[in-house]
Image (spheres, grey):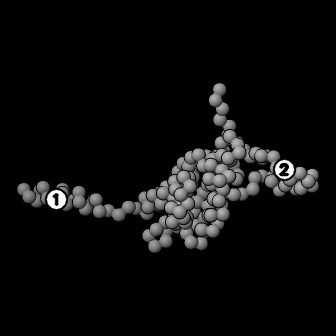
Amino acid sequence: MRRAVLAPCLLALASCGLAPSNSQRLTEAALEMNTAARFGRMDVAMERVGSDARQDYLRRHEGWGTRLRVVDVEFGGFEMLKRDEADVYLDVLWLRHDEATVRATRIAQRWRDERGHWHLVGEERRDGDTGLLGEPPPGAEKVAGEAASAGDGVRQPGLGFHTRVIRDE
């Protein structure tokens, strides 16, 4: 009788000690890092950025919280490329502090498992509006050239961006 009761208890206890899978650890790391970045906690986010990618990450995200505000970050899934390498997809809603236009950008982040810990090693814009990762807007060189030749140095805000406008009607 004791064996009949003891066996299910031991089985339940053994299942509690299972380590999370590789993909579960990736998902947890990506969600933790991107949520921290979304709320301006770059100190927490930087813990998940690989050492070779830190300077690039800081440069690309220096406008977050100052020149632009991240409204929402949605986890768009991931793709395992190798056992220790994956692409994580994010959909980011954001706006510039001097505008009321909400923009959407899809980012692909490259993650690598280094000694049991997932770290971000690179990211790029895949679709949507430019400017979220510090890249110049389309036509910025042309506008800057025209402004310099005109001598006024004023850039027209929002020029060349694809936008999503939300109106209350």
Quarter of the figure that contains the N terminus: bottom left
Quadrant in which the C terminus appears: top right
Q: Which residue sits at x=56%, y=72%? A: 51
Which residue is situated farthest in the left direction here? 1
**In x, y percent, where is residue 156?**
81, 46
Q: Is residue 19 left or right of residue 86?
A: left
| Label located before the other in sequence (1 or 2) | 1
Q: Residue at x 56, y 55 (%)?
A: 40
Q: Disc 1 marks which amino acid? A: Ala
In the picture, residue 165 is in which quadrant?
Answer: top right
Amino acid type at mark 2: Val
Element type at mark 2: loop
| Mark 2 surroundings: few (<14), some (14-19) or many (≥20) residues within 10 A | few
Q: Residue at x 32, y 62 (%)?
A: 18
Q: Residue 154 got which mark?
A: 2
Where residue 133 appears, as percent x and y from the top left, is 66, 57
The answer to whether residue 21 is seen in the rendering is yes
* Residue 28 circle label: none
Q: Is residue 79 visible?
A: no
Q: Where residue 82 sits: x, y (%)?
A: 52, 66
> Residue 7 has which mark?
1
Residue 47's x, y, as percent?
A: 51, 66
